[in-house]
Structures are given as C-alpha cells and as structure tokens.
Amino acid sequence: MQVFGLVGNPVGHSLSPPMHEAAYDALGMDARYVTFEPAEGELDRAFDGAAALGVAGLNVTIPFKQRALDLVEPAPLAERIGAVNTVDFAGATPTGHNTDAAGAVRALAHNGVALSGTAVVVGAGGAGRAVAFGLADEGMDVRIANRTESTAHDLADAVPGATGHGLDALPDLLADADVLVNCTSVGMDAPDTSPIPVDALHAELAVLDAVYTPMETRLLRDAAAAGATTVDGAWMLLFQGVEAFEIWTGRDAPVDAMNAALRAAL
C-alpha cells in the first residue's frame, strides 16, 4: 500500500483527504492519504520519519511551507516562489514543488479562460506569490495590488515583467484587464465584503477568487452581476491537489471524481 499525506499544524480542517482518497478509489489504487501534525520546529524530523517509513509523498501547509524549502531539493518554480507545498519522496533526495501556481492556472484554463493579456493579482502573500509567478510564466502581463504597496513592489521585482501597486490603483488596473485573481482572505473573514470596488468590474473580465468558504463570495456575485466570467476558489484548491497527485504517481488524475468529493466535503 502506498501512503501519501499532509503535514501541517493544524490540519483538522483540511479537505485534501477526501479529494485524494476519491482519486485512489476511482483508479483502484491501493493507497491511503493521512494527516500529520508535528510541532513547530519538528518538520525535519517529520520528513526523516516519513522517508524512513516509505511515505510516497506529502502535501505541506501552514506553518511549514517556507521551512520545507530548506529540507528538500526544490523544483525551480518552488524556489522562485519561496515555498513548498508538495514533497515527492521517490528519489534518493526528497524533491519539493509548489502546486499553488498550477492550481490557479489550471483552474482558469479548465473554465475556458484564455491565459493571455493582462492579469491583476490582489494580494502579495503566499498565494499571491504563487499565482503571480504562474500567470507570468504563461506569458501574461501581471499587475500586483496589495494593501502594503511596498510588498507589492517587492514581489513585482521578482516576477518577470510584473508591476506593483497599492489597492487604490485597482480601478485603473482593472479597466483593461483580462483576468483578476483575489489572493487575499477578504470574503472569507467577512463574507459580505469584497476587496474590489464593484464599479471596477466589467464583462470582459474573468474573476477567480481563491477563497472557497464560502464558494460564492461577494466578489464573485458582484463579478457575475457585471457579466464577468467567474471561477470559484474550489477549482484552485482542486487543481493544486490534482497537480500533486500527478507529480507523485505519474498518472493523469481523475479530476471529476476528485472534484465531486471536494465539493461534497465543502
């Protein structure tokens, strides 16, 4: 039996187990997905133990994504983003990946969004970093807006061709934009709020909100009312898991089965 899992603290809220277990069931794999909750400062021992026990792969979540970078051989994208959320133990040295970027890119593409033109990424934290790199690697012109403008500039300096801005610039940034991705927690912490001025939204936009609880955020309701294409955050969560599954197994993930299990668990 193959064992995969999630390491973080806390992990009790995670939706990864039902999503990955559904994939194993759909493909008839003899595999299980389990959760591990080491104390902070114990990630190196957790990785050593996982390798010794023959764990095939781990997802990594808060607060360990940055620390994991130092304990693996990072893939180039993970190194550029500065965080690891997926570890593959197949080789002599564990390799680290960041599938958050692919999660956003594949979520948009799956929903018929063309990855060309201009993208506005709101938020410059972990998710914002991953999404900005992912969209830039697809050839998009990336504009990063953040509450602390200097943080947006710092990220823009690292992302090829990107520019950094404060949130007050959003109306101008969105006027001719093709894609908008919200990578802040606004809409989750306060469900009836949105990080985007409603009059800045328009029908030519595709809007992905990384928030998935609730799935229909105020931003997505406003975007739909403006005629924009909307993509809920569960798609991004799904495809980061799909990407991890494919890294670990080398097989095409059963996307429909994973999506059904994820949405049933939300």
Image (spheres, rainbow, N blue to C red):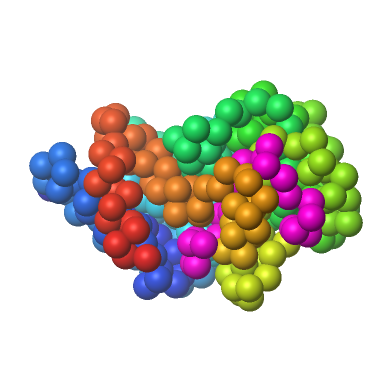
Residue 202, given in percent of the width and then of the height, sits at 72, 45
Res 205 quadrant in image: top right
Residue at 56%, 48% (x, y): give it: 230
> Is 261 on the left-hand or right-hand side of 206?
left
Q: Is residue 241 above or below residue 63?
A: above
Residue at 78%, 59% (x, y): give it: 197
Residue at 15%, 39% (x, y): give it: 27
Start-end of magenta stretch: 196-216
Q: Nearer the viewer, residue 85 or 71?
A: 85
**208 part of magenta stretch:** yes
Residue 41, given in percent of the width and then of the height, sits at 52, 67
**On the rendered image, what quadrant is the C terminus found in?**
bottom left
Q: Is residue 19 above or below residue 250?
A: below
> Is 243 on the left-hand or right-hand side of 155?
left
> Is 60 on the left-hand or right-hand side of 184?
left
Q: Is residue 56 visible?
A: no
Residue 127, given in percent of the width and then of the height, sits at 61, 51
Q: Is residue 214 above or below residue 154?
A: below
Q: Nearer the viewer, residue 23 or 71?
A: 23
Magenta stretch, main secondary structure class: loop
Residue 77, given in percent of the width and then of the height, sits at 58, 34
Q: Is residue 170 visible?
A: yes
**176 part of magenta stretch:** no
Q: How many marks?
A: 0
Residue at 36%, 41% (x, y): give it: 242
